[in-house]
């Protein structure tokens, strides 16, 4: 009775212990078809001989698996236009051979029934397998990201500047999964570790709210790509300049005054951004607004403006420059010359040159540019008293 009570008292404590993953590993005989079971039962009476047999079988299985993979998949890889599959195949040959062979060694250790050290040895072998798989997935993620970056016209989120970020995220996920598996192998309950990590994460989150906000905004800016290096942007706060650096914490903009502005990513993430270099191409349309006096031949005005645009060497021929009459002003007929330039950084200078040419051409052709005038009428002079 006393022993029964003691067992009942200790049972709740044993329930909280996580069973090692290696304890659930099946015996080698469980993997064999039924027709081979009698032969294995006879061999299992000699544990050392059975263990050596399992090790040799898995060694040849690993060798055959590697050779079949190289030959069959290698033939298909030679017919493809990319060398990604060739590099992946070459990089995975050794890891796959090692994983299959080491897994066979774990089954051989269970079959050997050594007097001591079996459980520790199995855990070590399984841990080595996990480490090999982690390195293999590291290799796969790096190769895949580089291949996607080379085809960035199809995958906008993956570019040369985003590869380091995505590579870190992928390897972090692989490490977390691998660490969780290692804890299960050694029978360590991961719930306590996860709870501790959660508490630490909350403390760090509260202590570095602004920094984390900038980091997350930088991550989404890199993924969403509202702008890229070399783009000219206009912010809702009035700044205009070229993007010179996109980091995880901030973005740098070089203005036309050669002044570099560092803007936190959290600000840009919530700001309205006009990307003058965005769209299907880098070309940008400029507008030259001009008013002419009432009574001027509007067809002549249109012809003069078109000739000015066509004579400028830095305006694009395609799309062609056009002129639009926008309306009737208080003292002028309002026109607008629309033309395309190659890059946004030329906007200020070309607008300046076009304005001068419009003024000179209008003077040469007798086209009046009106300006507000006011006439003062005096009905009478005040009477002075002597």
Image: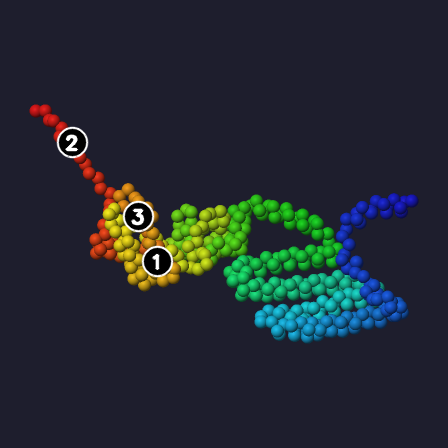
Q: Residues within 10 Å of mark 3 (few under 14, many from 20)?
A: some
Identify which residue is drawn at 42% across, 49% down. 235
Answer above or below: position of 79 versus 11: below
| Left or right for 205, reference 105 | left
Quarter location, residue 338: bottom left
Could you tell me which quadrant the N terminus lies in? top right
Q: Name the residue carrying label 3.
A: 334
Contact between labelled residues 2 and 3, with CB atoms less than 8 Å apart: no
Count of picture labels: 3
Q: Secondary structure at mark 3?
A: strand
Identify which residue is drawn at 75% across, 66% down. 103
Q: Name the residue carrying label 2.
A: 379
Residue occupying the far right of the picture: 1
Q: x, y (%) of residue 102?
A: 74, 67
Q: Name the residue carrying label 1.
A: 321
Q: x, y (%) of residue 169?
A: 59, 57
Q: Could you give the CA–CA distance between mark 1 and mark 2, rounded to whole angstroms?
A: 51 Å
Q: Is residue 381 visible?
A: yes
Question: In this view of the protein, which residue sits in the foreground, 138 or 321?
Answer: 321
């Amino acid at each position: 009775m006393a022993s029964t009570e003691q067992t009942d008292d200790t049972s709740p404590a044993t329930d909280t212990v996580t069973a090692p993953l290696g304890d659930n590993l099946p015996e080698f005989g469980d993997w064999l078809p039924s027709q081979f079971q009698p032969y294995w039962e006879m061999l299992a009476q000699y544990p050392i001989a059975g263990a050596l047999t399992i090790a040799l079988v898995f060694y040849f299985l690993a060798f055959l698996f590697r050779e079949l993979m190289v030959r069959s998949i290698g033939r298909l890889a030679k017919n493809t236009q990319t060398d990604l599959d060739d590099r992946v195949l070459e990089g995975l040959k050794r890891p796959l051979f090692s994983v299959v062979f080491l897994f066979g060694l774990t089954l051989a250790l269970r079959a050997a029934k050594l007097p001591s050290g079996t459980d520790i040895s199995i855990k070590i072998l399984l841990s080595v397998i996990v480490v090999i798989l982690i390195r293999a997935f590291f290799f796969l993620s790096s190769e895949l990201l580089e291949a996607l970056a080379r085809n960035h016209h199809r995958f906008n989120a993956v570019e040369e500047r985003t590869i380091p970020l995505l590579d870190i995220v992928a390897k972090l996920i692989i490490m977390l999964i691998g660490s969780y598996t290692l804890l299960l192998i050694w029978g360590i309950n991961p719930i306590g570790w996860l709870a501790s990590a959660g508490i630490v994460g909350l403390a760090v989150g509260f202590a570095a709210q602004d920094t984390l906000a900038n980091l997350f905004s930088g991550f989404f800016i890199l993924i969403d790509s509202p702008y890229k290096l070399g783009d000219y942007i206009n912010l809702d706060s009035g700044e205009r300049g070229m993007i010179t650096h996109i980091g995880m914490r901030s973005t740098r903009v070089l203005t036309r005054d050669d002044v570099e502005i560092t803007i936190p990513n959290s600000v840009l993430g919530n700001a309205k951004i006009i990307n003058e270099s965005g769209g299907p191409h880098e070309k940008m349309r400029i507008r030259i607004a001009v008013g002419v006096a009432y009574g001027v031949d509007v067809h002549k005005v249109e012809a003069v403006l078109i000739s000015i645009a066509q004579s400028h060497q830095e305006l694009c021929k395609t799309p062609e420059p056009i002129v639009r009459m926008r309306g009737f002003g208080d003292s002028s007929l309002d026109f607008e010359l629309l033309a395309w330039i190659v890059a946004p950084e030329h906007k200020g200078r070309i607008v300046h040159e076009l304005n001068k040419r419009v003024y000179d051409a209008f003077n040469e052709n007798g086209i009046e540019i009106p300006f507000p005038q006011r006439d003062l009428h005096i009905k009478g002079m005040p009477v002075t008293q002597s």
